[in-house]
Image: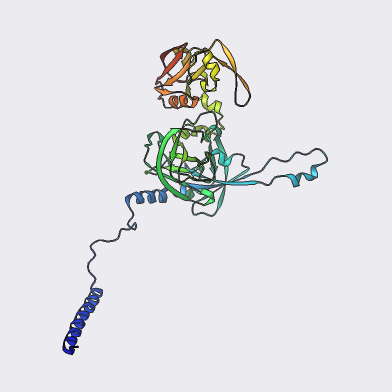
């Protein structure tokens, strides 16, 4: 081995190492000027920043709702009262969500969250104290309830009620609530669809014709919580989920949740604040309508439809109210009747030669809910175009829905 060449190589390496060491030390002693400063929000994307700001601004207006429901007392024959305490079912507890809408302490939630409750309490975000609440008003056919709580003003953070008629499919949707009892949870997705109510919300009266479908995660406990847009406005009340088993409300998130449009709720806030419990009959009476009673032809047996040469689908007029928009437009009730058997086994008399409503503003009618959806979207004084089947012929009638007392 050539020792001179080795020593020379060692000397070169030492100089290089010393240079590297000196560069590192000098860099530590004299920091290079920063070309950019870290953002105060931790470098959030604009999409993330929007969500965080909404949560921080309105999150304290979402409440945790707890209820206690006491089963009815056991009724025993005289002389057996001694056994009543042993047979009495224990109180049931449940949880849900709600949100503040004003500084008076009014809280919106779902009716099914507080139905039959003997005690209702609410908790605010970041406040361990429970506050007693009372049921002020309700609209069971819409699955809506209004609570009132006496709480310090600083705890009441009202959420802004938006305009659900302006929702666009694909826009951001933020859900807040308490799924599975996990206090104050936020999930996010989009508005997946605005669709005809598939039976997810409300009862069989069909008074909730449309629902908001979202893929923001909604689970048991989210019921009654708000669905918000990117401006932080409430566009709906989270109410139901759909599962792969086809059951509404089962404890399994599958990316298909449903919210009650907030504009429908806003219509009845004055009555709810006044302490009313609205039945389906009262709600219908206060909405513009045609003044007819109808039965879907889908309930008619096929042999009956063939016998009277009726269409396969549509709504058969059964009665026409006097001085109603329907009567003024010339809709005809039946003069001949037959009996059909409902799935419940009940026999129902139905008309067989009355007018059949086929379409409303071009929308095919297979259910009363579809007709109501068209009527409720009308502005005051605006007519609806009805395509009518009459004794084998079709005609179009213009009818202006009205509130009939």
The vertical placement of 251 against 351, above or below, is below
Q: Nearer the viewer, residue 168 or 60?
A: 168
Regarding residue 229, the answer to whether it shows in the image is yes
Please tell me in which quadrant of the rendered image residue 247 appears.
top right
The vertical placement of 195 against 328, above or below, is below
Residue 33 rendering spot, x and y as whole percentages: 22, 67
Q: Nearer the viewer, residue 359 or 284?
A: 359
Q: Residue at (56%, 42%) from the top-left corner?
A: 113
Residue 78 rendering spot, x and y as whole percentages: 82, 38
Residue 80 rendering spot, x and y as whole percentages: 81, 42
Q: Residue furthest front?
A: 1
Q: Does residue 381 appear to the left or right of 242 in the view shown?
A: left
Q: Does residue 176 appear to the left or right of 66 in the view shown?
A: left
Q: Does residue 60 appear to the left or right of 25 in the view shown?
A: right
Please count the marks in the image.
0
Q: Residue furthest right?
A: 79
Q: Quadrant of the N terminus?
A: bottom left
Q: Residue at (24%, 77%) from the top-left corner?
A: 25
Q: Residue at (45%, 49%) from the top-left corner?
A: 186
Residue 36 rendering spot, x and y as whole percentages: 25, 61
């Amino acid at each position: 081995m050539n020792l001179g060449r080795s020593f020379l190589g060692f000397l070169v390496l030492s100089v290089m190492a010393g240079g590297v060491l000196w560069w590192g030390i000098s860099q530590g002693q004299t920091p290079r000027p920063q070309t950019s400063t870290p953002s105060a929000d931790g470098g959030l994307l604009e999409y993330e920043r929007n969500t965080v700001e909404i949560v921080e601004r309105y999150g304290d207006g979402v409440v945790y709702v707890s209820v206690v429901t006491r089963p009815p007392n056991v009724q025993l024959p005289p002389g057996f009262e001694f056994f009543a305490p042993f047979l009495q079912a224990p109180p049931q507890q449940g949880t849900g969500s709600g949100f503040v809408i004003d500084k008076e302490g009014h809280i919106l939630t779902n009716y099914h969250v507080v139905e039959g409750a003997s005690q209702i309490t609410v908790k605010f975000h970041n406040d361990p104290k429970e506050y007693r609440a009372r049921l002020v008003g309700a609209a069971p056919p819409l699955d809506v309830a209004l609570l009132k709580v006496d709480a310090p003003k600083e705890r009441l953070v009202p959420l802004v009620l938006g305009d659900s008629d302006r929702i666009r499919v694909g826009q951001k949707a933020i859900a807040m609530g308490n799924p599975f009892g996990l206090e104050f949870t936020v999930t996010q997705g989009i508005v997946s669809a605005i669709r005809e109510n598939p039976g997810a919300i409300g009862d069989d009266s069909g008074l909730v014709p449309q629902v908001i479908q979202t893929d923001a995660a909604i689970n048991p406990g989210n019921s009654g919580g708000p669905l918000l847009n990117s401006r932080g406005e409430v566009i709906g009340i989270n109410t139901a989920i759909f599962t792969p088993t086809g059951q509404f409300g089962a404890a399994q998130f599958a990316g298909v949740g449903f919210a009650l449009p907030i504009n429908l709720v806003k219509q009845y806030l004055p009555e709810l604040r006044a302490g009313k419990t609205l039945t389906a009959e009262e709600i219908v009476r206060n909405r513009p309508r045609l003044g007819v009673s109808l039965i879907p032809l889908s309930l008619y047996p096929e042999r009956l439809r063939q016998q009277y040469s009726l269409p396969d689908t549509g709504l058969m007029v059964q009665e026409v109210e006097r001085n109603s928009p329907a009567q003024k437009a010339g809709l005809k009730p039946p003069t001949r009747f037959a009996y059909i058997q409902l799935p419940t086994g009940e026999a129902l008399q139905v008309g067989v030669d009355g007018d059949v409503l086929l379409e409303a503003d071009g929308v095919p009618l297979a259910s009363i809910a579809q007709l109501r959806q068209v009527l409720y979207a009308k502005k005051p004084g605006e007519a609806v175009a009805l395509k009518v089947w009459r004794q084998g012929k079709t005609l179009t009638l213009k009818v202006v829905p009205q509130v009939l007392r």
